[in-house]
Image (spheres, grey):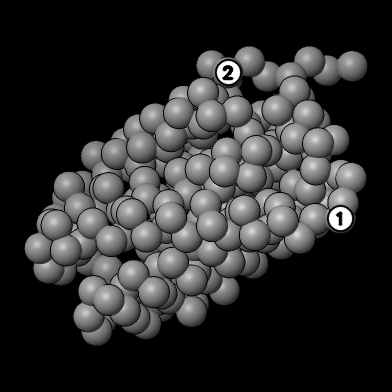
Amino acid sequence: MTSAPNLSRRFVAEVIGTFFLVIAALLSPSGLTFALVGVTLLVMVIALGQVSGSHLNPAVTLGLVAARLFPWREGLVYFVAQVLGAFLALGFGQLVDRRLPVAGSHANAVWFESLGTALLVFVVVRIVMAKATPAASALAIGLALTVGIAIAGPSSGGVLNPAIALVLLTGDLLKGSFFANLVYFAAPLLAGALAAVVARAIAPVGVEEQDRQQVTARPSDEAQRVR
């Protein structure tokens, strides 16, 4: 039996996966961003899912922690890895001329970023609890992100990832003031946590504790094939 990857290996996997996800988000042609980001996530879930689970998104990690499907201490490590991967991508690409379109008011950004992230995290948590196969997990999660970006994109840019939001904020790649654009960081975290709690609440009675033990005890199992 193959042993579960240790936390340092999972840290590296999260850095690598987030790096490529941010590259896809910020350097893809504008008309293809939603599709290429979704495909990149699908590929990273397949490539790294059995190592770290391919969270690649602080909102996803926080959602799993909120649903009691992931240890909060390891969640902090994942958060650091995801932010590091995002900033490595910023440095690599030197993204001085890449700006996501921000249409409408910041109030709209809150709602659309929340909606898209909630969709993604809800799907992730349900897949974890349903113990989906690796192929099904990758396809569903990749498509969920693609749909989320397609929904939110016209109104908020479809960021849906606090790690990417930090890169955009510090790199001055979002239109508007820094503090006003903090919604791109905060809204996905809150929406993801709420979506995760709802996803867990609708689980069949009697499976919650079993799922929690499996996810937290064995990082290489189905629960780790998530973004």
Whether residue 57 is visible:
no
In the image, is residue 205 above or below residue 64?
below
Residue 92 lies in quadrant? top left
Counting from the top left corner in percent of width and height, residue 81 is at 43, 30
User: Relative to 123, is 116 above or below?
Assistant: below
Residue sitting at x 57%, y 38%: 65
Q: Are marks 1 and 2 in contact (CB under 8 Å)?
A: no
In the rendered image of this protein, does residue 8 appear above or below residue 80?
above
Tag nearer the camera, 1 or 2: 1
Q: Residue furthest left?
A: 177
Determine if residue 62 is in view. yes
Q: Is residue 221 left or right of residue 172?
A: right
Of residues 186 and 19, the one nearer the viewer is 186
From mark 1 to mark 2, how far is it between C-alphas? 31 Å
Residue that appears at 37% across and 82% down: 154
Q: Disc 1 residue type? A: Pro
Residue 186 x %, y %: 33, 54
Q: Secondary structure at mark 1?
A: loop
Amino acid under label 2?
Leu
Residue for point 73% across, 39% down: 223
> For residue 28, which quarter of the picture?
bottom left
As helix, strand or loop, the secondary structure at mark 2 comes to: helix
Tell me which label, 1 or 2, sits earlier in the chain.
2
Residue 23, percent from left and from top: 39, 51
Q: Residues within 10 Å of mark 2 (few under 14, many from 20)?
A: some
Q: Which residue is under mark 2?
A: 7
Q: Position of residue 150 (x, y in %)?
A: 49, 77
Residue linked to disc 1: 204
* Disc 1: CA contacts within 10 A as few (<14), some (14-19) or many (>=20): few
